Image: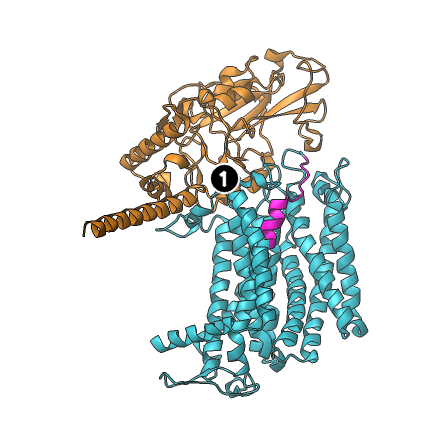
Chain colours: A orange, B cyan
Amino acid sequence: MKDKDEKKIEKRELKINRRTLLKGALAGAATTMLPLNRADASFKDFWESFFQKHFREMTVAEKQQVVQRLEQEYERKYKKAIQIGIEPAMPGVLFGYGLDLSRCIGCRTCVYACVHENNQSRDPQIQWIQVLRFKHGDLMNWEKAEKYYDPKQVPEPGYFYMPVQCQQCENPACTRACPTQATWKEPDGIVVVDYNWCIGCRYCMAACPYGARHFNWGEPGIKPADINPVTHYLGNRPRYRGVVEKCTFCIQRTRKGRYTACVEACPVGARKFGNLLDPKSEVRYAMEHKRTFRLKDDLGTHPKFFYFFDFEAGERFSG
Amino acid sequence: MIQTIKNFIIAWGSIFKGSAKYYLWLAFLAGLMAVGVHAYIGQAEHGLIMTAMRDQVSWGFYISNFTFLVGVAAAAVLLVVPSYVHHDKPIKEIVIFAEMMAITALLMCIMFIMTDLGQPLRVWHILPPPIGLMHWPSSLLAWDVLALNSYLFLNIIVVFYVLYKLSRGEHYKMKSFVGFLIYLSIPVAVSIHTVTAFLYNAGFSRPFWGDAILAPKFIAGALSSGPALMLLVFQVLRKVTDVKIEDKTLFRIATFITYALAIDLFFIGSEVFVSFYPGTAESASIHYLFFGLHGQTNLVPYIWTSVIATVVAFVLILNKGTREKFVTLNTACVLMIVGIYLEKGMGLVIPGFTPDVLGEIYQYTPTATELMVSLGVWAFGAMVYTLLVKFALPVYTGKLRFASSGKEDIHEVKVVRPHVEEVPEEQA
């Protein structure tokens, strides 16, 4: 009698074990494709992550709930507290950018400041800013642009440099292309991506005329110590494999009234940033007093990123 | 209703009844599929970094295959029009096999898209609200999802309805709802390839794709390579099954192909001239494709293979002597498929990205993962088509008939060719 009971209990245990095992295996298989820390992912996390709504469809309360779950996921994954902001656009603000080509020396300080601020993957490398080198006379002759220049010292005589990043178009080709509305233009003019809604089809990358969109071809490689823990949901929070990312004008900073990391890092003051709706902003000053132009303006994308040459302040006749 | 479902399941039973050769063929395909699954698991584990695609060339071999297969799916229309609109008897007898090929090609298209996605589990985001957030009508990709799925469902309904009627020894009427669906499938077939061309056209930052002739060229290419594939498959069909397809029918299809290929070559020529002659910066991509750029030449062999194959195929199929001889006709078909596969696949997708929008040249060559996954998808397609044909055959040849009364009265009748001989309402 006793024997039988024990056997029964044993059997049940076995059953439970097998069932949980199966469940675990299923959840495990599914999570290899989901943005979760696999080892600790519970079924509830998987469920909530899988059915997470589009950011713009969520109420503020839902956003807070999602952010809380994501913060826990990140903490498990990186063993570091990461704070995710959801600050909305400020009313009466339309961000714009100015870049003084006569000042830029091609040192790529901005590139690395951006990588650190925005938690880009180090291995494989993702960089939101690409600096192109042109010979004098070859401006915007793309076939002659050099991305991988590597001299001992910059600036080099006979060359000038043109950093290119997301131009934050007013009429973006990328957001129109996206089949799931995972990328869109915010009211303050910043084009953002919901990394939890993007399906990774990369049609936006085919559409973008500026090469500003970057894909996580592999698992983003970033050491926990290197992670900037102050993030925004639509900006620099750690990304997942298989989604697209891009420059967001440092949304986590600029929505709090700060400069972007690239503006702060530039050693020659070539980068200007501000509110296009504010007549006293730096970027408006540049637009009104300098000879500005926009990249590939003929495509009708209406970038909010203005390049200009500044002979009075620059006087850098290096060649 | 329940009886119909029961009968449906019984009919599916025929896929398990086959010769040793049949099972060997299925096992062979299953083996190839296993290779694909194995490679795909690696890709799911490590990400798309296992492919040769990078930010510069963000679409590659998968999308190339997809584009070609959309053409194969659309090509069924070449047989649908003569059979249902013009009631061309010999073609009408085999149109169902063309429609099955469309179903197969569409399933393969969906698989190639799925393997290309970075987050395949989130694919439901593309569905219309309230489930997903389909970006319609802005995104051409949303249009493509709609067009491809509509065409898939149309073909599934038509094929299975025709077989259902046939299995009860009845005839379907063109003046019925299904008749309407058959007519509807004609413009939808054209639309799937048009929308796919517009998908590329919409990328206005890449001049290589900004060609108004792209959609017509896609259709012409589809109407030659797709039926060429059908010609080969039909010959296999009549050899390994008791489906009877006359030489005359095949040669008639070959004539259609000749027209389509002539138009395709004309379109390609026009496109090449317009892209080449001005020699502006916008010619860089086509220059890269045909001659290489700055010493980077890895697409050159693809396109010249394509050009030579297509031209030789055209010569072979244009000449009546060689068109109506199976050795040369089949050579022409194979060359045509290879030529158009390379031109519409790699020759279209990759140069669009090379040089990239900031002038960089990234040399793309598919990796082993991409080749193996694609092989797996093609094997899957062959498997699906085999099973569909196996399912349809007993009904098609009249070996399997269900009583119309709806009672459990399954009996096997030997009717040799009951298919379209007696469809009187068509003449009206």
Residue B134 visible from this viewpoint: yes
State the quadrant of the N terminus of chain B.
Answer: bottom left
- Residue bounds of the magenta highlight: B361-375
Question: A161 or A317: nearer the eye?
Answer: A161
Kindly state the secondary structure of the residue where label 1 is placed.
loop
Q: Is residue B219 magenta?
A: no
What residue is rendered at 28% in x and 50% in y?
A11
Image: B367 above or below A212:
below
Across and down, in percent, residue B314 comes to 77, 64
Residue B198 visible from this viewpoint: no
Across and down, in percent, residue B151 comes to 50, 63
Number of other residues with Cα within 10 Å of mark 1, as a class: few under 14, some 14 to 19, many 20 or more: many
What residue is rendered at 64% in x and 54% in y?
B214
What residue is rendered at 66% in x and 29% in y?
A140
Q: Is residue B367 magenta?
A: yes
As drawn, is A304 to the left or to the right of B329? left
Residue type (three-letter) at the residue carrying disc 1: Gly
Q: Which chain is indicated by disc 1?
A: A
Per the image, the residue denoted by label 1 is A242
Across and down, in percent, residue B90 comes to 62, 80
Across and down, in percent, residue B283 comes to 72, 42
How many discs mark residues in the rendered view? Answer: 1
Question: B117 or A140: nearer the eye?
Answer: B117
